[in-house]
């Protein structure tokens, strides 16, 4: 599960590039400063959680093939 106690997280997208997935969205404290990362097969996103940070997947309509790891 996600949470503030998970300080470092990464997600690695698996696939062959034919998948249709939503974007990954990161924001920190100020929701107007949101960063949007489009899905790309065989790519990785790494982020550090702190107080007020948020992440979510947008417009995902299929099962994502991912490796998701968090560190406390």
Image: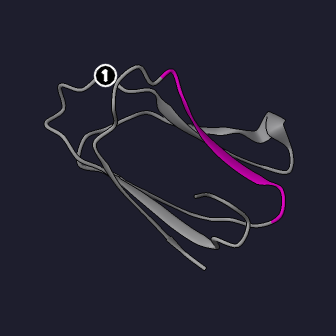
User: Residue shown at 41%/19% (left/top)?
Assistant: 61
- Which image quarter is the C terminus in? bottom right
User: Residue shown at 64%/46% (left/top)?
Assistant: 55
- Which image quarter is the N terminus in? bottom right
Q: What's the magenta region?
A: 51-59
Q: Secondary structure at mark 1?
A: loop
Quadrant of the image occupied by residue 67: bottom left
* Left or right relative to 27: residue 10: left
User: Residue shown at 18%/32% (left/top)?
Assistant: 17
Vertical order, 50 against 29 (above or below) = below
* Residue 70 pos. (x, y %): 51, 69
The residue wearing badge 1 is 20
* Residue 14 pos. (x, y %): 23, 47
Vertical order, 31 against 9 (above or below) = above
* Left or right relative to 6: residue 18: left
Q: Which residue is farthest front?
A: 1
Q: How is the image coloured?
A: one colour
Residue 56 counted in the magenta span: yes
* Residue 29 pos. (x, y %): 85, 51
* Left or right relative to 43: residue 36: right
Q: Which residue is farthest left?
A: 16
Pick the residue in front: 53 or 63.
63
* Residue 39 pos. (x, y %): 38, 35
Quadrant of the image occupied by residue 33: top right
Residue 60 counted in the magenta span: no
Near mark 1 (Cα within 10 A), the count class, few <14, some 14-19 or many ≥20, is: some
For the stretch drawn in magenta, the main secondary structure is strand
User: Residue shown at 57%/72% (left/top)?
Assistant: 8
* Left or right relative to 8: residue 3: right
Count of numbered badges drawn on the protein: 1
Vertical order, 21 against 65 (above or below) = above
């Amino acid at each position: 599960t996600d949470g503030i106690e998970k300080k470092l997280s990464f997600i690695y997208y698996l696939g062959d590039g034919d998948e249709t997935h939503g974007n990954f969205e990161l924001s920190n404290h100020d929701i107007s400063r949101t960063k949007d990362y489009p899905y790309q097969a065989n790519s990785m996103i790494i982020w550090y959680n702190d107080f007020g940070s948020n992440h979510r997947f947008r417009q995902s309509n299929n099962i994502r093939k991912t490796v998701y790891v968090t560190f406390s």
